[in-house]
Image: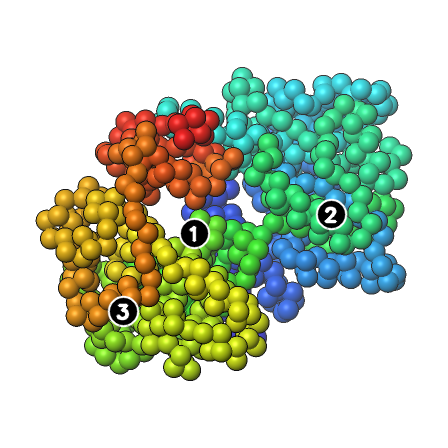
Amino acid sequence: MADAKGRIEKLKKAINKYRYDYHVLNKETISIEALDSLKHELKKLEDEYPELVTPDSPTQRVAGEPLKGFKKITHRVPMLSLEDVFSEEEFSDWEKRIAKLLHISYTTELFSELKFDGLAVSLVYKNGVLDYASTRGNGKVGEDVTQNIKTIEAIPLRLEKDIKGEVEIRGEVIITRKGFEKINREQKKKGEAVYANPRNLAAGSLRQLDPKMTASRNLDFHAYDIVGDIGQKTHAREHEILRELGFKTDKEAHIAKKPEDIFKFKEKIEYLREKLEYEIDGLVIQINDNAIFDKLGVAGKAPRGAIAFKFAPKEATTIVRDILVQVGRTGKLTPVAVLEPIQVGGVTISRASLHNEEEIRRLGLKIGDTVIVGRAGDVIPDVRKVLKELRRGKEREFHMPKQCPVCGHKAERDKGGPLTFCLNKKCPAKHREGIYHFVGKNAFDIDGLGPKIVDVLLDEGLIQDAADIFDLIEGDIKPLERFGEKSAENIIRAIHAKEKITLPRFLIALGILHVGEETALDLADRFGAQEKIKEASLEEINDIENIGDVVTKSVYDWFRDPYNKRYLEKLLRRVSIEKYHQPSGKLKGKIFVLTGSLETITRGEAKARVRKLGGKTSESVGKDTDFVVAGSEPGSKLDKAQKLGVKIIDEKEFLKMI
Ligand code: IVH
């Protein structure tokens, strides 16, 4: 209880600060998703300890103070907000709660629609004519934005049907993603602040004092609610009436009979999300029958009969329980954060690489800290920021060990660099990781031979090094079948299928420090054969355009190490390297950098095609880059290309070239 109290206090303070930055200063100091994550934690704690809820808690407040400069309008019926759920489990909990309240063992029909990421507004029509319009503001009082609303063509100034008296329509003012990008480009050109997201832009555009400015923003509107009774019995019917009155409603919206329909719908929309014209951040699900919806009433600031089913956030906050140190195949010691398990991007993560000592220093991370985690490139978990204001004084400093955590041998920082290495050549951890790498995708790519089987092969003494893999027979693997991987026969077949290998893959498989895909290709292109690389002088290696001093020394030293020499000979007695054909296509010598996502071709394919035609690909834009291929939502590489004056081409042009 005391712990919860302290945590709640810290959370409230932090949330209030970020909210102020975001809503008042229009500054996004942490992402809205990370903020949501903090709010979610607070809400959960408060649910657990209701006696700790105070009236000033962010969970008790509705966003957005009305700005000065606009007339205030008091809503006739408060504009509520929605409770969020993030998982199927939380959604089912909501359903069960409703069913219990209604004394039924199943939920009635649900209505499901997209949750647009825009700004909620209220439109009041008098005798069919738009009388006034206001923003949601704090839910009770909003701002009069009638003049600006009138510039939005999607909003009828007169309803398509004459309705006597007053009728209030609610919905979301939104802007297309393309419109958002365009305006931000213009803002940048003018040297003005860019908007953090389409929602901020919609809000900013409606709060322009000059309606001409609003008009230039091409805002759109989707209606989702009719306040008061004009004969609508269900929410589905409400959508129909809204269309009859001249509004757009969500085209994907539909009735769901059971929760599984909702889960399927969500999956479909999550897949479609990137392709939609508008930014959405989840689904709104509500009881379709309005009488039941009304009967359920309101809890706090949200109706009980509706819920926002949010998409898996790409960022979340969690606690770093510990920092472990892993030893990789090159002997590199990598600190890894052990996290309180948390959902990010739809999967639960419990570990995140911290890369090296410098990164920990840069983040200012201590064990016990609350951090923002995300997934780099939407895949690899990473720690992005430490929320130092949530510290309690019990956090512990982390120190990189002076000894290898696996073999106990001395570990040292690389001269001048941020990395720490185990100095023991025969460190078992290095060895093990090296074999995982050897059988992995970019190297020998042996089907069905994953780390689990490699572990057993090593532990049972069936292999000493990677070369031994080629001496295995079915009988060695048979007892391992319980691991549920492929059958022994298939694995042995897969091993033999890889006895011939291309030169670049062979070089990658050797596990030479700093030799990844690009460097292996550069070495193959320059020397053409393993024997030549083995004998190449420092100058010859250093001569290669993309290869600097550090990589040169690493390659040169590897081939001169007695231990490696013996291993190389052993390996070459078991596998053969295919003759390497230096590429000589029409893209010879041209360097390509890919950024953003391509629609008709995967990144891997695109790179392979470039290489086949004699070109090269690189991960970073430099002066020697010939083309930057910009897909949709390109990153900072595009800005860099513009700065350096590198030619930028789109996917269509690129496809023509390849
Ligand atoms: S229904 C009680 N339907 O989400 C509020 N809201 O978190 C009923 N929103 O303030 C709202 N799309 O700004 C509803 N299809 C939709 C929506 C939607 C976006 C926003 C709206 C609301 C917020 C609630």
Residue at the disc numbered 1: 376
Displayed quadrant of residue 41: bottom right
Residue at 33 percent across and 66 percent down: it is 574
The tag earlier along the polypeptide, 1 or 3, is 1
State the residue at coordinates (62%, 40%): 272
- Name the residue at 33% across, 69% down: 467
Above or below 457: residue 514:
above
Res 236 seen here: yes
Quadrant housing residue 248:
top right
Disc 2 to disc 3, C-alpha distance? 64 Å
Give whichever of discs 2 and 3 has the lower sequence position. 2
Image x and y of residue 198, in percent: 53, 35
Question: Is any part of residue 389 visible from this angle?
Answer: no
Give the position of the C terminus as an image quadrant: top left
Left or right, residue 239 beside residue 573? right
Image position of 514 (left or right of 253):
left
Q: Which mark is residue 285?
A: 2
Label 1 beta carbon less than 8 Å to ligand 1:
no
- Residue type at mark 3: give it: Lys
Q: Is mark 2 in CB contact (under 8 Å) with mark 3?
A: no
Marks 2, 1: nearer the viewer:
1
Q: Is residue 54 above or below residue 198?
A: below
Determine the CA span between mark 1 and mark 3: 39 Å
Q: CA distance from mark 2 to mark 1?
A: 31 Å
Q: Which residue is mark 3?
A: 570
The quadrant of the image that shows the N terminus is bottom right
